[in-house]
Amino acid sequence: PSLLGCSALAWFGCSLGKMVRTTSALLVAAVLASTCVSSARAFSLAQDVSFVRDQVSRRGGLGAGHDHHTSEVDDVPVDRLEYWYDGQLLDHLNGGENGETWSQRYFMNDTFFDKNKQLVFLCVGGEGPALQPTVVVTGGEHCAWMINLAEKFGALIVAAEHRFYGKSMPKPDYSVDSLQYLSSQQAQGDLKRLRSFVTNTTDGLESYAKWITFGGSYPGMMAAWARMLNPDLFHASVSSSAPVQAELNMQGYNDVVAYSLTDQSVGGSLSCLKNVKLAFMHLGDVLTGESQSDMEQLAKTYNVCNVSQIFEERNQKMFLEGFWGLFPLQSNDPSCEGDYCNYQKICDLFDKQDDPRQSLLTLFQSLG
């Protein structure tokens, strides 16, 4: 098996399920940029309290006597950021069919908007946790840099929620019949129409304004495709860690993860990588071996709900997939306070213990 397991679409195991729920935001990304683990500073932009406080103050969100020790982001008035487009088309691919429409949620922040420059920065939503109104203040994980650029260049900030995620529901349920309208192609149609609507309803925004899309991972793919498919509407795209060309069993991802474990700037080392490999090699040896008793013991050790399920190859892949969440592949934070919350602490664990197998188990149990 590869360094961090095999690809799969689902999970199983009691404690695995719990661990995965706490790390799902990390795992939705399909590819990792070669510098993302060492670039914790880029993510910290979303948590720059002084920067957020300044925006909130400009928008009148801080009243007299405000306690600056509370979350400034929580104090942003939602009604100043959250908007709805009631005329979004349900089906963009079949000529609109009967013209059925729905309400798409989007967010907007005009704090930095310079009408003389006519720039719009669009943060494209994706399949992760639902966007919050404050995404146009902090940028979230995928668009934090965009917020700082907006201040520098005088751009209007807009964020579009992806259909069927958050409150943007084209249909009232997730039935098969409803989910036929969930696709990247349909979501691209949403971006086109939303652009037109925002242009027509925003004071001072002209039709010739230059729109630039931003996103990371799947939203990064959406951002890039928007520019590629509609260059007349979207002037440019900032697409981060976006696998716009799908690749089965992307070994390059694992290579980058392996390299990051050796990066001394985040606490990695060659010995750390060696020990992590040995730990996963043990998992591979057990799962590809002929001893069912060894497999059963492995399943019990990691608290798999139905031990006998470990014998099926499909379930073995799901089992290995769960270990991705143990490593902060895309959000390494040197200042975190948890036991094994960053590469420095994880590599210390693998370097200090004699048995890499026990190190992996300790790491797993710490998130159980």
Image (cartoon, grey):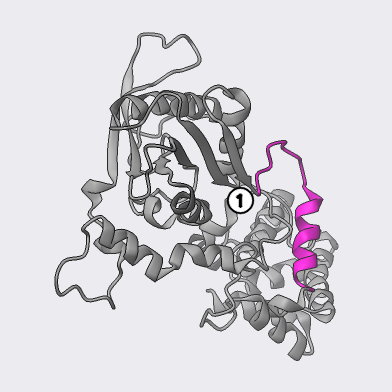
Count of numbered circles in the view: 1
Left or right: 82, with 29 as reference point:
left
Q: Amino acid at mark 1?
A: Ala
Residue under the point 77% across and 81% down: 356
Left or right: 153, with 31 as reference point:
left
Q: Is residue 97 above or below residue 114?
A: above
Q: Which residue is mark 1?
A: 29
Q: Which quadrant of the figure contains the N terminus?
A: bottom right
- Please tell me whether residue 257 belongs to the stretch shown in magenta: yes
Q: Residue furthest left?
A: 64
Residue under the point 63% across and 27% down: 228
Residue under the point 46% across and 38% down: 119
Locate residue 307, reporting x and y percent. 63, 63
Q: Nearer the viewer, residue 35 or 11?
A: 35
Locate residue 68, reporting x and y percent. 27, 75
Locate residue 113, reporting x and y percent. 37, 44
Residue under the point 50% across and 42% down: 126
Segment colored magenta: 241-262
